[in-house]
Image (spheres, rainbow, N blue to C red):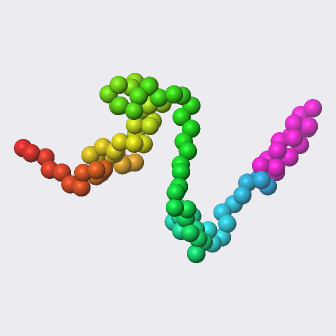
């Protein structure tokens, strides 16, 4: 019985290792390589982005809504004067510069 589990574990690990795609050579560039697309490609004049919310919004007024679905939309629509970087620092949002008065 233990031998069967050992064989099953080896087969499962071989399957996982075989299905895992490694990095393809020559695909460095990440998002920049995908943004440009193929040379000569024209973008459509009208582009639409559909976002699934999962719930109906209470309001588009940020002062009148209290639910999570509305908060997600507010983050996408409204940009603050400053925003927080992934490191936790404040970086310019709408404001190009600011000064602290003493």
Which residue occupies the foreground of this view, 12 or 21? 21
> Does the image show residue 30?
no
Spot occupied by residue 5 in the image (x, y as percentages of width and height): 87, 36
Q: Quadrant of the N terminus?
A: top right
Which residue occupies the foreground of this view, 30 or 62? 62
Q: Residue at x 53, y 51 (%)?
A: 48
| Magenta run includes residue 21 | no
Which residue occupies the foreground of this view, 5 or 89? 89
Spot occupied by residue 50 in the image (x, y as percentages of width and height): 55, 44
Q: Quadrant of the C terminus?
A: top left
Q: Of all residues shown, which one is farthest toward the bottom?
A: 40
State whether residue 8 is above or below residue 22: above
Could you say which quadrant of the image residue 67 lies in?
top left
| Magenta run includes residue 10 | yes
Magenta region: 1-16
State whether residue 21 is above or below residue 53: below
Which residue occupies the foreground of this view, 36 or 83? 36
State whether residue 52 is above or below residue 39: above
Q: Residue at x 73, y 54 (%)?
A: 20
> Does the image show residue 57?
yes
Asked whether, in this view, residue 34 is left or right of residue 101, the answer is: right
Q: Residue at x 24, y 55 (%)?
A: 96
Asked whether, in this view, residue 78 is left or right of residue 37, the answer is: left
Asked whether, in this view, residue 61 is left or right of residue 42, the answer is: left
Q: Main secondary structure of the magenta part?
A: helix
Spot occupied by residue 94 in the image (x, y as percentages of width and height): 28, 50
Spot occupied by residue 40 in the image (x, y as percentages of width and height): 58, 75
Q: Of all residues shown, which one is farthest toward the front?
A: 45
Figure label count? 0
Q: Residue at x 83, y 42 (%)?
A: 9
């Amino acid at each position: 019985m233990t031998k069967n589990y050992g064989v099953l574990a080896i087969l499962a690990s071989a399957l996982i290792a075989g299905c895992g795609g490694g990095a393809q050579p020559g695909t460095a560039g990440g998002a920049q390589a995908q943004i440009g697309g193929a040379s000569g490609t024209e973008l459509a004049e009208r582009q639409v982005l559909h976002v699934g919310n999962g719930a109906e919004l209470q309001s588009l007024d940020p002062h009148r809504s209290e639910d999570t679905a509305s908060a997600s939309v507010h983050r996408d629509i409204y940009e603050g004067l400053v925003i927080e970087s992934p490191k936790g620092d404040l970086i310019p949002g709408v404001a190009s510069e600011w000064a602290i008065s003493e």
